Image (tube, rainbow, N blue to C red):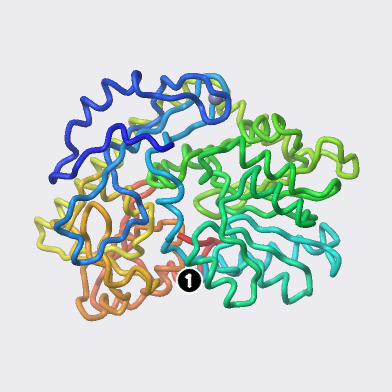
């Protein structure tokens, strides 16, 4: 059951964070993988609302729930993790995020499917299951090739859209229970896909156990998740939010899968979400796939970078604080010069960043987002209104703060028109950077992804 400990009613300041911290040792539970008591802080971003809880105008004068965004590292298995304060049902059951709205992410999905069909030899007799399949944006690429698909998507509103688009989708959470139900109904998978779901699972052991059950004897599991090594290297503390329970290194994921009889036989490093891993897993007993060198090399790099030593994790906190000071410094100077500032992309990482830094409409006039599911709403906690990107042309702001920095090249290309009135882009992570020379940035673009 979700703990309600630490629930604080928002009164305009991050109330009593010091007091909350002083009792955390008492209220802390165990590591979500190995159960060892959590005692060490990775980073403490104070109190924050759920990142996807967009507010309607009528909700702005109501109480809002804030939860601790306090990340711990397990001294035993080095799993970096948040406590569970809100049930997954409350977080994900009516999720506003639809993957289909990012063009680079759709291309990423299509390229993945082409690779998978060839590499795993999938055909009309194969069964593909995607967990957290969203609106079916990825699976539809298999349907076009006449391969059987099934989506498992806990957000009922999103699953409904997928079904309407002809993608068979089960509106359920995935774990041992769902896997057993599927197997008893005769469904087992040649390929199980999970993109950006492993980190979102509160019951990590139950989830991986379910993978083991659902996978055919010579099947493959691929999972993509943000790589903790990149989070640390690039100071991506704003990718921490309540929906995102675990922050994963290759070494730790290998241990988690091994505990459930699954071996990682390959891994790729991807540029998505600020640096992700795509792991390839199989049953321990499946001798048809040799273990590649990539995993061994990556593990050696993680070890060399200190990922098996506690001190490495304990030094991260100070970098988040320094970024907050630098961003506020920039915004205060800009406002003193009477500049106007808008934000682009009401992404979850923006909610973390703005709440941590205490940036509201005193600095940012409004945010824009391409998703019609966010337009007309307000960002949680900071109450910044969200409009269609067309608002930028109307108001001609001096600065656009790009919140989903992973999409910065795409956004800078799309919004190059701000150069017409001398507007500039500001990217907060890894360092506060202003992009005045728009023309030089045109057409560059890295193969990035969704927000
Ligand atoms: Zn642990």
Left or right of 433 on screen, residue 139: right
Where ligand 1 lies, by image quadrant? top right
Q: Is residue 306 visible?
A: no
Give the vertical position of 445 relative to 336 (above or below).
Answer: below
> Which quadrant would the N terminus be assigned to in this image?
top left
Placement of the C terminus among the 4 image quadrants: bottom left
Residue nearer the viewer, 358 or 187 = 187
Q: Which residue is the site of mark 1?
A: 101
Q: Secondary structure at mark 1?
A: helix
Could you say where residue 86 lies in the image, as x and y percent from the top left?
38, 43
Place of residue 219 in the rendered image (x, y in percent of width and height, measured from the top left): 81, 50
- Asked if 130 appears above or below 314 in the picture, the reply is below
Q: Is residue 77 above or below residue 240?
A: above
> Which residue is at 19% across, 42% downward?
9
Badge count:
1
Q: Which of the two residues, 195 or 429, is positioned nearer the viewer here?
A: 195
User: Relative to 243, is 176 on the left or the right?
Assistant: right
Q: Quadrant of residue 284?
A: top right
Q: In terms of depth relative to the viewer, which is nearer, 72 or 326?
A: 72
- Residue at image position (41%, 19%) is 39
Q: Is residue 115 left or right of residue 237?
A: right
The residue under the point 65% across, 49% down is 178
x, y (%) of residue 203? 55, 38
């Amino acid at each position: 059951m979700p703990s309600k400990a630490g629930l604080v009613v928002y009164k305009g300041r991050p109330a009593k964070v010091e007091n909350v911290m002083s009792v955390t040792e008492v209220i802390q539970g165990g590591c979500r993988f190995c159960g060892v008591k959590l005692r060490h802080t990775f980073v403490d971003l104070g109190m924050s609302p759920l990142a996807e809880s967009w507010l309607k105008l009528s909700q702005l004068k109501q109480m809002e729930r804030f939860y601790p965004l306090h990340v711990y590292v397990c001294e035993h298995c080095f799993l970096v993790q948040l406590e569970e304060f809100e049930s997954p049902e409350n977080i994900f059951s009516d999720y506003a995020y639809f993957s289909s709205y990012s063009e680079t992410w759709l291309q990423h999905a299509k390229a993945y499917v082409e690779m998978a069909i060839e590499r795993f030899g999938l055909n009309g007799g194969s069964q593909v299951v995607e967990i957290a399949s969203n609106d079916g944006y990825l699976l539809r690429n298999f349907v076009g090739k006449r391969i059987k698909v099934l989506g498992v998507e806990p957000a009922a509103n999103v699953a409904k859209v997928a079904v309407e688009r002809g993608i068979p989708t089960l509106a359920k959470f995935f774990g041992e229970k769902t896997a057993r139900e599927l197997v008893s109904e005769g469904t087992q998978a040649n390929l199980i896909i999970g993109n950006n779901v492993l980190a979102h699972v509160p019951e990590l052991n139950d989830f991986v156990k379910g993978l083991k059950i659902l996978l055919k004897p010579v099947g493959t599991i691929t999972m993509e998740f943000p790589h903790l090594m990149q989070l640390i290297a690039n100071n991506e503390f704003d990718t921490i939010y309540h929906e995102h329970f675990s922050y994963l290194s290759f070494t730790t994921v290998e241990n988690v899968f091994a505990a459930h009889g699954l071996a990682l036989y390959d891994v790729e490093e991807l540029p998505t979400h600020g640096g992700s891993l795509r792991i390839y897993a199989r049953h321990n007993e499946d001798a048809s796939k040799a273990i590649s060198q990539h995993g061994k090399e990556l593990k050696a790099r993680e070890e060399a970078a200190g990922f098996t030593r506690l001190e490495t994790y304990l030094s991260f906190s100070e970098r988040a604080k320094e970024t907050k000071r630098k961003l506020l410094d920039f915004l205060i100077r800009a406002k003193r010069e009477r500049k106007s500032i808008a934000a682009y992309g009401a992404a979850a990482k923006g909610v973390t960043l703005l709440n941590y830094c205490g940036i509201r409409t005193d600095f940012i006039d409004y945010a824009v987002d391409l998703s019609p599911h966010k337009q007309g709403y307000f960002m949680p906690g900071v109450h910044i209104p969200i409009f269609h990107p067309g608002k930028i042309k109307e108001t001609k702001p001096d600065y656009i703060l790009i919140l989903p920095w992973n999409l910065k090249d795409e956004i800078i290309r799309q919004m190059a028109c701000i150069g017409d009135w001398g507007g500039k882009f500001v990217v907060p992570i890894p360092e506060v950077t202003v992009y005045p020379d728009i023309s030089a940035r045109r057409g560059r673009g890295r193969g990035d992804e969704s927000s």
